[in-house]
Image (cartoon, rainbow, N blue to C red):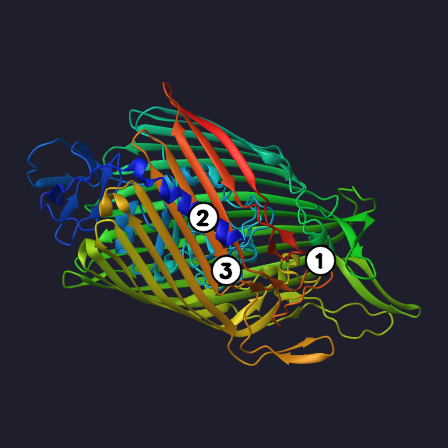
Amino acid sequence: MTLISGRHLFLAVSLLLPTFLSAQDARIVRGTVTEATADGRPLEAVEIVQLPEGGGTLTDVDGTFRLRLRVETTTLRFRRPGYAPVEVALTPGELAPLAVRMTPVPTELAGLTVLGHGGGALARLPGSGAVITPELLRMTRPLSGNEVLRGIAGVHVQDEEGLGLRANIGIRGLDPDRSRSVLVLEDGIPVALNPYGEPELYYTPPVDRMERIEIVKGSGSILHGPQTIGGVINYVTPEPSTVPEVRWSAVGGGGGFGRAQLLASGQHGNAGVLGMATYRRADDLRGLNLTTVDVMLKGTVTLGTRDALGVKIGVYDERSNATYVGLTDSLFRANPLAYPGSDDLLSVRRLTASLSHQRELAARTTLRTVAYAFTTTRDWSRQNYGYNTTGNGHLFTNGTGNRDRAFEVAGVESRLRAETALGEFEGGVRGHLEWARDQFFSGTTATARSGALRDDEKRSGAALAAFAQQHLAVGERLRITPGLRVEHVTFDRTILRTRVRRVTGSGTTNLPEDVDIRSSDAITVLIPGVGASWYAGASATLFAGAHRGFAPPRTKDAFVLGSETLAPGESVSDPVSLQLDAEESWNLELGARTRPRDGIMFDVTVFALDFTNQIIEPSLSAGSVADAALANQGATRHRGIEAALELDWRDLGGVPLRTGVQYTFVDATFSRDRFLRTGNDTVNVRGNQLPYAPRHLLAMHGQIGHRDGLQLRLDGQLISRQFSDNFETRTGSANGRIGEIPAHALWHISGSTPLPGSRAVLMVAVKNLTNRNYIASRRPEGIKPGMPRMVTAGVEWRL
């Protein structure tokens, strides 16, 4: 019924088209774009956009372009990474060929970017990628980044609490749990707790303060480590504006949800500054209550004509009752929006700082260096519980497990980008240090936030990486892009206190004791990759790529305490190495980015990932029991296709409507024999679908606008069924942790309109339009229902 209702809604929006019709203008403008230097070389893949109507094209390899204009009077904006934007005003009358010259300038001073700005950057990418644009973020008004990431082909996002506070992102059939297989960056800097030893996302960059989000899935991943398996997601924050800007917004909605944000930015002389503060709260979003405060400051200073400095400082503070506990099967059937009732408390605080320097060494040769540091504390008090005799009800006890964890990270990375006689080159080095302190306190009441120290350990890691990628031009249109990354990583772990199993005359004890158990490990790996692209101009780019996927084993779980039988009086021996291999794969892809005519964009990619070894994560968020250890999972295979079609009806029929569809098929299975015990049986799971890897993902959207500024957008998402274990178990367990996750479809609608006579814009959004009840996940510890229908409304004001 939900799918039918969604189609009817989409049809209803389409029927409104006659009221938005506008005449199509067939004027054509042609021209050439060159570099404003002595040689005046032509610039390919320059993005040309019409303002304010939107729509545009890219320059060909010889710098030429052809563009159909939509209105008589318009402005063309020319953009390319590394060059100052150029705007050209056009007026009614005869159109002479344009000759546009673009000046090289330093860019992105406060951090490193994965793609650069604009569609031109995608055109030069030796593999598949995507950009979530500022326009899309403004139109969808997302509550979390999960909403917009689901609109990217190949990306699967698993909800947990509904606001994306701890994102679970998987790409091309990889397990989304805590986004461990995806390298997540903010302004080019890793954001995981410990990027090498513990790459979980217990903090996710808030989408509220992002300008755009970049996604790279191909061989370009090797420029950004350490994880190169699932791809790269880079959250990009705005740069200081060249003119004074003040922006304030406030949004409210159901469940006591509220969000307020203030942004101020400007430039004085050779210095620019931007400040942004965001406050969010919720009183009862399906039982969740929270408050978050997020503050960011950025500054840039240009020193002469060759040097520029950038600085960025951030503070994030969260306090919520987020819980691992999910619903049992019977609780979900009785009330899908019920809260389990645990008395949990989560506190997350994150402090970040980065300093960047860019120097132009020569024409079209720049060196960027970024020093970064951040600390994250994550203190989580969780009430102890068990199940009743049938397993379908929780039994909470007067005790808590307080998992207090602190992480520190520091590093320096330098990148050289140059245009040589062979083509564009990018390479660099990175030194990285990280530390972690992990403590467990046993509380004796239901609300105790501390207690007796049970476990205490310290971990540290050091990494040195070098990377390089060279674009080799073969003729005017073909580029071969070989690359190599080298990672050397060392890990150290010291267990200061833990439970020690002793055998005495009266039995066996397992009590906390002070110990001094030390272990260390090191790994060096070469990560090669190669990409090829044939650039046919604005109409098409064909690409192919292959690269080695790599992720280091997690430090915390690389060693466990010995478990051999002990004689009376003996204690546990030294830690036993699990001999974990790094996760490694070969990633292949073949695809095309095409624009067969004005108003049509079609991308398609065929991909294959072959793992020699995947690692089973033992975390509770993966549904494992406490104290479980990592295990070598063995070989898995991922095969699939991604396709995206975008239609701009302003170019196709003079209608201010844009529609699109993104589809992903993934067949992710165990590719070799693997025998696992289930109950009293041993089962070979070869050929079984991997957990949390839906075979089909479909995203659709339609966006319509009026010349007076009214904008409406409808988004639909369909996720096929998933399994929560290795055995493809369909029947749900009583405690809700195991079983099929049925297919579900979701629809969202959003809109905005300027308020007459003011600088304000009214914003309205409805998430889960049909109020569909569905299972979003069965982990960490039971059924996590999806968010119910939620209506938000607000206003944005600009000075």
Residue depicted at x 12% and y 53%: 62
- The x, y position of residue 372, in whole percent, is 45, 44
Judging depth in this view, the residue of 538 and 471 nearest the camera is 538
For label 1, the SS is helix
Residue 329's tag is 1
For label 3, the SS is loop
Q: Amino acid at mark 3?
A: Ser
Q: CA distance from mark 1 to mark 2?
A: 32 Å
Q: Amino acid at mark 2?
A: His
Q: Residues within 10 Å of mark 1 (few under 14, many from 20)?
A: many
Q: Is residue 458 above or below residue 557?
A: above
- The x, y position of residue 50, in whole percent, is 22, 38
Mark yes or no: residue 237 visible: no
- The x, y position of residue 135, in whole percent, is 36, 39
Q: CA distance from mark 3 to mark 2?
A: 38 Å
The quadrant where residue 377 appears: top right
The quadrant where residue 615 appears: bottom right
Which residue bears the numbered disc 2?
8
Residue depicted at x 42% and y 47%: 10
Q: Is residue 591 above or below residue 766?
A: below
Judging depth in this view, the residue of 403 and 149 nearest the camera is 149
3 or 2: tag closer to the N-terminus: 2
For label 2, the SS is helix
Q: CA distance from mark 1 to mark 3?
A: 29 Å
Q: Amino acid at mark 1?
A: Asp
Which residue bears the numbered disc 3?
181
